Image (cartoon, grey):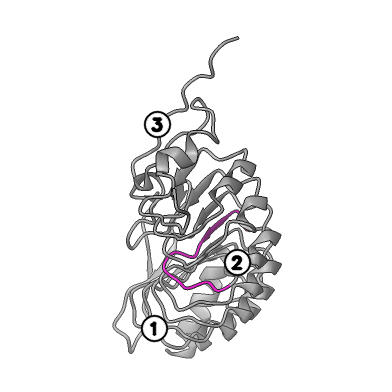
Amino acid sequence: METEDCLEVEERLKADPFLALGDRRIESLAPLATLTHLRFLWLNNNKITDLSTLAALTELKHLWLYENQIQDLSPLSNLVNLELLDLASNEITNVRPLSNLTQLTQLSLFENQIEDDAPLVALSKLETLNLESSGITSLDAISNLTNLTNLSLDFEQVNDWQLLSNLGSLTQLSVNQAQSDEPHFPTPLQIYSPLFPPYRLRSSSSREIKRPSRQPPFVLPYTVPNRVEVHSPPNRIEIQTAPERHISPNSEPASPLPSAPSN
């Protein structure tokens, strides 16, 4: 990239700190080191293994890193302003660096192999959490996240389902294909029916909260005016101003909550 091109990118991103670099087979993030004004960054479906460059991007609020080859999350511990983080489909086993990210409200660890989810207990503001196929074996830490409204535990094998009763704010729960070593393993219906009043639990279908393919998950619809995006062959970056567009998940909107029964 020419120096003039770099300067143009930086100036545009200062005015509108949004950058999409998904599906580009990127291996190194070094060129992003000076883009410290970024707040929204798409890096999905690349070949990223090293996140050290991101440690300097402390103004980031939304970060999509799904479908990469990430193992070490240590550089993310500096990103204390993050509110949304998608780490789905990586090679993550240790989530301890995430314990610093106390502003997170939305987190996906879908398709990883988490060895210890205890650090997640620090993320008390979490409202949406996707742990589908993440390898957790206990709900002890999760049961303390009392602000959760949306939780996916599909394909997990845990034995302490009763701890879900602590999650008094849940309105969406998915436990499809979940397993247990308990001799009388409950069905999904048996798991949530005794725990949540029928007028408060919105859905138990994974279709409500399943991570959409090639789309940032869990994002409330919002309009992105004149964002800077990159559309170019790998050897050259050209800046193109995108038209105003609407970004929202692919999943169908959840049905309204039924009214609580009157006294």
Mark 1 — residue? 47
Badge 2 crowding class, 10 Å Cα cut-off, few under 14, some 14 to 19, many 20 or more, is many
Name the N-terminal-most of marks 1 and 2.
Answer: 1
Please tell me whether mark 1 sits on a helix, a strand or a loop: loop
Mark 3 — residue? 255
Q: Are marks 1 and 2 in contact (CB under 8 Å)?
A: no
**Range drawn in magenta:** 104-115
Mark 2 — residue? 117
Q: Tell me the kind of residue under disc 1.
A: Lys
Indicate the quadrant where residue 24 lies.
bottom left
| Residue 260 in the image: above or below residue 263 | below
Instruction: Residue at 42% x, 49% y: name it.
Output: 175
Indicate the quadrant where residue 123 lies.
bottom right
Badge 3 crowding class, 10 Å Cα cut-off, few under 14, some 14 to 19, many 20 or more, is few
Is residue 69 shown to the viewer in this render? yes
In this rendering, position of residue 92 left or right of residue 263: left
For the residue pair 85 and 184, the one nearer the viewer reads as 184
In this rendering, position of residue 262 left or right of residue 224: right
Instruction: Residue at 60% x, 66% y: name it.
Output: 117
In this rendering, position of residue 131 left or right of residue 123: left
Instruction: Residue at 36% x, 74% y: name it.
Output: 45
Give the Cα distance between marks 1 and 2.
25 Å
Please tell me whether mark 2 sits on a helix, a strand or a loop: loop
Is residue 247 shown to the viewer in this render? no
